[in-house]
Image (tube, rainbow, N blue to C red):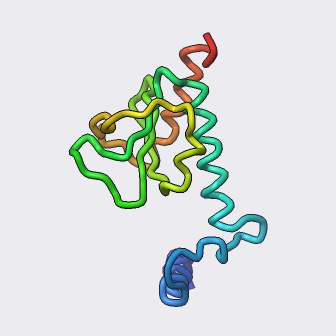
Amino acid sequence: MSPSKRIRGINWMISTQLHGDQSDRISDGSHTFGDLYIHRAVLFAALLKAYPDKSWRSKVQSDGHGFPGYFLCGIQTPEGQYTYHYQLFQWDLFDGVRELPESPAYDGHKPEDVTRLLSLSKEGDANE
């Protein structure tokens, strides 16, 4: 079986066997997806707090809509913005990050644009 066919089979098994959010039950042997999601949230919160003049959070998107139960937070880098949606129960994790009535307009970034975050270090120390 080719790797891509094997991966499609695994994804199909996951989608048919798990109902609702059961990310804490899927593991690579070291971490569950739930572990990795909370790690990402903590690391992104720390980054946003290190660059308060470039960071924001909002419960409303620039088009006036939101996702029930979620908020959006992001940072403006020299290469463009980068954002994540988080569940509202994680709002307090981002305490101290500037709250906006609505988010800046989406610039079209995609998951693979996460490397934009590295461009922040090109501007110098976060505390300057």
Image quarter of residue 17: bottom right
Can you give x and y, in whole percent of width and height, for residue 97 in the image? 52, 32
Image quarter of residue 113: top left
Instruction: Classify the position of the N terminus by image quarter.
Output: bottom right
Can you give x and y, in whole percent of width and height, for residue 13 in the image? 53, 87
Against 7, residue 103 (above or below) is above
Q: Which of 42 and 89 is in front in this view?
A: 89
Can you give x and y, in whole percent of width and height, for residue 25 in the image? 66, 77
67 lies left or right of 94: left
Q: Which of 108 and 40 is in front in this view?
A: 40
Instruction: Classify the position of the C terminus by image quarter.
Output: top right
- Residue depicted at 50% across the width and 42% down the height: 114
Q: Residue furthest left?
A: 63
Against 111, residue 103 (above or below) is above
Against 15, residue 59 (above or below) is above
- Residue depicted at 52% across the width and 24% down the height: 52
Against 61, residue 11 (above or below) is below
Image quarter of residue 100: top left
Q: Nearer the viewer, residue 126 or 70?
A: 70
Q: How many marks?
A: 0
39 lies left or right of 57: right
Q: Residue furthest top?
A: 128
- Residue depicted at 52% across the width and 38% down the height: 115
